[in-house]
Amino acid sequence: MDRKTCFFIGNRYTPGRIEEVLTEAVEKHIVEYGVNTFVVGHYGDFDSLVKPVLIEAKKCHPEILLYLLAPYALIQQIETPIGFDGTFYPEGMETVPKPLAIVQANRKMVERSEYLITYCHKSYGNTRKIVEYAQRREKKGLIKVTFL
Protein backbone atom coordinates (compact mmCIF):
# COMPACT_ATOMS: atom_id res chain seq x y z
CA MET A 1 0.00 0.00 0.00
CA ASP A 2 1.28 3.44 -0.89
CA ARG A 3 1.70 5.76 2.05
CA LYS A 4 0.05 9.18 1.83
CA THR A 5 1.08 11.42 4.67
CA CYS A 6 -0.73 14.36 6.24
CA PHE A 7 1.03 16.72 8.61
CA PHE A 8 -0.61 19.22 10.97
CA ILE A 9 0.60 22.65 11.97
CA GLY A 10 -1.24 25.40 13.80
CA ASN A 11 -0.97 28.36 16.08
CA ARG A 12 0.11 27.66 19.62
CA TYR A 13 -3.12 29.23 20.89
CA THR A 14 -5.98 27.61 18.98
CA PRO A 15 -9.62 27.74 20.09
CA GLY A 16 -11.33 24.45 20.89
CA ARG A 17 -14.29 25.46 18.72
CA ILE A 18 -12.42 24.22 15.62
CA GLU A 19 -12.70 20.58 16.74
CA GLU A 20 -15.73 19.82 14.54
CA VAL A 21 -14.20 21.24 11.36
CA LEU A 22 -10.91 19.52 12.21
CA THR A 23 -12.72 16.18 12.59
CA GLU A 24 -14.42 16.69 9.22
CA ALA A 25 -11.10 17.55 7.56
CA VAL A 26 -9.40 14.42 8.93
CA GLU A 27 -12.28 12.23 7.73
CA LYS A 28 -12.16 13.85 4.28
CA HIS A 29 -8.42 13.26 4.04
CA ILE A 30 -8.86 9.57 4.87
CA VAL A 31 -11.94 8.85 2.75
CA GLU A 32 -11.47 11.17 -0.24
CA TYR A 33 -7.70 11.64 -0.48
CA GLY A 34 -6.59 8.21 0.73
CA VAL A 35 -4.36 9.55 3.51
CA ASN A 36 -3.19 6.68 5.70
CA THR A 37 -0.41 8.26 7.77
CA PHE A 38 -0.79 11.28 10.04
CA VAL A 39 1.97 13.15 11.87
CA VAL A 40 1.36 15.80 14.54
CA GLY A 41 3.54 17.67 17.02
CA HIS A 42 2.88 18.06 20.73
CA TYR A 43 3.73 21.58 21.85
CA GLY A 44 0.62 23.76 21.56
CA ASP A 45 -3.16 23.97 21.70
CA PHE A 46 -3.52 22.97 18.05
CA ASP A 47 -1.51 19.78 18.52
CA SER A 48 -3.51 19.02 21.68
CA LEU A 49 -6.75 19.30 19.69
CA VAL A 50 -5.48 17.14 16.83
CA LYS A 51 -4.35 14.12 18.87
CA PRO A 52 -7.76 13.02 20.23
CA VAL A 53 -9.38 13.66 16.83
CA LEU A 54 -6.85 11.31 15.24
CA ILE A 55 -7.33 8.68 17.94
CA GLU A 56 -11.10 8.75 17.30
CA ALA A 57 -10.53 8.54 13.54
CA LYS A 58 -8.37 5.45 14.05
CA LYS A 59 -11.29 3.71 15.77
CA CYS A 60 -13.27 3.97 12.51
CA HIS A 61 -10.22 3.52 10.26
CA PRO A 62 -7.85 1.13 12.08
CA GLU A 63 -5.58 0.98 9.02
CA ILE A 64 -4.32 4.55 9.48
CA LEU A 65 -1.01 5.16 11.21
CA LEU A 66 -0.53 7.95 13.77
CA TYR A 67 2.87 9.40 14.66
CA LEU A 68 3.98 12.07 17.06
CA LEU A 69 6.70 14.35 15.68
CA ALA A 70 9.75 14.21 17.96
CA PRO A 71 12.14 17.05 17.04
CA TYR A 72 14.28 16.50 20.16
CA ALA A 73 14.39 12.69 20.07
CA LEU A 74 18.16 12.51 20.48
CA ILE A 75 18.16 14.59 23.67
CA GLN A 76 14.65 14.17 25.10
CA GLN A 77 12.58 11.02 25.48
CA ILE A 78 8.89 11.41 24.78
CA GLU A 79 6.23 8.81 25.30
CA THR A 80 4.07 7.65 22.44
CA PRO A 81 0.50 8.67 23.25
CA ILE A 82 -1.97 5.84 23.75
CA GLY A 83 -3.61 5.17 20.40
CA PHE A 84 -0.58 6.30 18.39
CA ASP A 85 1.73 3.98 16.46
CA GLY A 86 4.98 5.67 17.41
CA THR A 87 7.09 8.78 17.21
CA PHE A 88 8.82 10.19 14.17
CA TYR A 89 12.22 11.86 14.09
CA PRO A 90 12.96 13.41 10.68
CA GLU A 91 16.18 12.37 8.98
CA GLY A 92 18.96 14.93 9.12
CA MET A 93 17.93 16.58 12.39
CA GLU A 94 21.09 15.46 14.21
CA THR A 95 22.99 18.66 13.38
CA VAL A 96 20.14 21.13 13.93
CA PRO A 97 20.65 23.39 17.00
CA LYS A 98 18.00 22.85 19.69
CA PRO A 99 16.44 26.36 19.33
CA LEU A 100 15.73 25.61 15.65
CA ALA A 101 14.65 21.98 16.02
CA ILE A 102 10.87 22.45 15.96
CA VAL A 103 10.94 24.84 13.01
CA GLN A 104 13.29 22.58 11.05
CA ALA A 105 11.31 19.42 11.89
CA ASN A 106 8.09 21.14 10.74
CA ARG A 107 9.75 22.18 7.49
CA LYS A 108 11.03 18.65 6.88
CA MET A 109 7.53 17.28 7.47
CA VAL A 110 6.09 19.70 4.91
CA GLU A 111 8.71 18.42 2.46
CA ARG A 112 7.82 14.77 3.02
CA SER A 113 4.02 15.08 3.24
CA GLU A 114 1.44 15.12 0.49
CA TYR A 115 -1.09 16.96 2.67
CA LEU A 116 -1.07 19.65 5.34
CA ILE A 117 -3.96 20.61 7.62
CA THR A 118 -3.43 23.95 9.30
CA TYR A 119 -5.00 26.48 11.61
CA CYS A 120 -2.93 29.59 11.01
CA HIS A 121 -4.62 32.87 11.85
CA LYS A 122 -1.65 35.06 12.67
CA SER A 123 0.17 37.04 10.04
CA TYR A 124 3.55 36.45 11.69
CA GLY A 125 5.60 33.78 13.44
CA ASN A 126 7.11 30.43 12.60
CA THR A 127 3.78 28.73 11.91
CA ARG A 128 2.97 31.37 9.30
CA LYS A 129 6.40 30.94 7.69
CA ILE A 130 5.98 27.16 7.45
CA VAL A 131 2.46 27.53 6.01
CA GLU A 132 3.73 30.03 3.43
CA TYR A 133 6.48 27.55 2.53
CA ALA A 134 3.83 24.84 2.11
CA GLN A 135 1.75 27.17 -0.09
CA ARG A 136 4.76 27.73 -2.36
CA ARG A 137 5.14 23.95 -2.61
CA GLU A 138 1.41 23.64 -3.28
CA LYS A 139 1.77 25.91 -6.34
CA LYS A 140 4.27 23.35 -7.67
CA GLY A 141 1.82 20.49 -7.04
CA LEU A 142 3.93 19.01 -4.23
CA ILE A 143 1.43 19.26 -1.36
CA LYS A 144 -2.22 20.11 -0.76
CA VAL A 145 -2.89 22.61 2.05
CA THR A 146 -6.20 22.65 3.93
CA PHE A 147 -6.98 25.68 6.09
CA LEU A 148 -9.36 25.29 9.03
Image (spheres, rainbow, N blue to C red):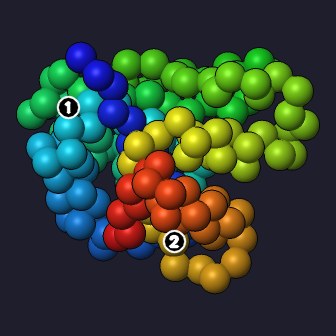
Image spot of residue 65 (x, y percent): 31, 25
Three-letter residue code for mark 1: Lys
Which type of secondary structure does the marked residue at label 2 adopt? loop
Q: Is residue 21 left or right of residue 81?
A: left
Task: Write the residue at 39% across / 48% down.
Answer: 115
Can residue 46 be seen here?
no
Image spot of residue 23 (x, y percent): 22, 55
Task: Sort mark 1 into few (<14), some (14-19) or many (20+) by Cα contacts within 10 Å.
Answer: some
Three-letter residue code for mark 2: Cys
Q: Quadrant of the N terminus?
A: top left
Of the residues under marks 2 and 1, which one precedes in the sequence?
1
State which mark lies toward you, 2 or 1.
Answer: 2
Mark seen at residue 137: none
Image spot of residue 125 (x, y percent): 72, 71
Q: Which residue in the structure is indicated by mark 2?
A: 120
Can residue 115 be seen here?
yes
Q: Is residue 18 left or right of residue 12?
A: left
Dividing the picture into quadrants, the one containing residue 122 is bottom right
Q: Is residue 113 left or right of residue 4?
A: right
